[in-house]
Image (tube, helix red, strand yellow):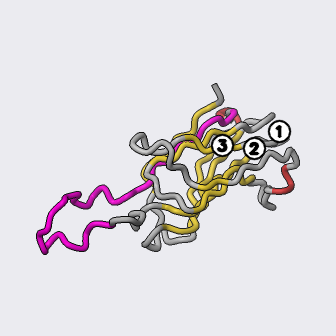
Amino acid sequence: MTLPATLALSWTAAQAFELGTVELIFDVGLHRVCTFTTQDEEEGTEHWGSPEPEVLQDYSLQVLHAAGEQHGMAHQVLGGDIESPRATPTSSTDQDDTPASNQADDGWITVAQVTGNYQRRVVHSLQLTGGRVIGLRVVCIRAAGIDEARICEIRAYPVG
């Protein structure tokens, strides 16, 4: 997907559920050989001190509630890669119960805005109040070094 891009998941009204957690797995160049070498042919393939060019750095998560359901939200980013649990991306937290502050005209509500991500795995713990969701979308804004979004996996878990 050329950036900016959107990836949406949807469920029928019968499949709607109270969303609790969203787990995202991004491409971080695992296809490259990771080696510590002084060989000339491998020089320049490592990315020391900067995010891998494939990782999605700036994105937002949006939800679409089932028709007629009330919604408010709170959001927290939990953990990251198991290897570096303290390294979490910057995320905005919206605890305002008035959905008009972050609701688009098309009914989608932004529940997380992330900038500067460099991790492969990011877990968003959501506390959406009073509503089941029928849609989840990731709005991909910027990758670290390429002009496309590479999301390997999206998992959406219900509350509990």
Q: Residue at x 15, y 63 (%)?
A: 37
Residue 47 position within the rendered picture, expressed as x and y whole percent measured from the top left: 33, 67
Q: Residue at x 43, y 51 (%)?
A: 120
Circle 3 SS class? strand
Cα distance between the residues tagged 2 and 1:
7 Å
Residue at screen point 50% across, 49% down: 87
**Which residue is tagged 1?**
69
The reply to whether the C-beta atoms of the residues labelled 3 and 2 are less than 8 Å apart is no
* Residue located at (67% from left, 40% from top): 126
Q: Check whether the beta carbons of the residues at disc 3 and disc 1 lie within 8 A of each other.
A: no
Looking at the picture, does residue 15 appear above or below residue 91? Answer: above
95 left or right of 24?
Answer: right
Residue 114, given in percent of the width and then of the height, sits at 61, 57
Q: Is residue 33 above or below residue 133?
A: below
How many angstroms separate mark 3 from mark 2 (CA)? 19 Å
- The three-letter amino acid code for the residue at tag 2 is His
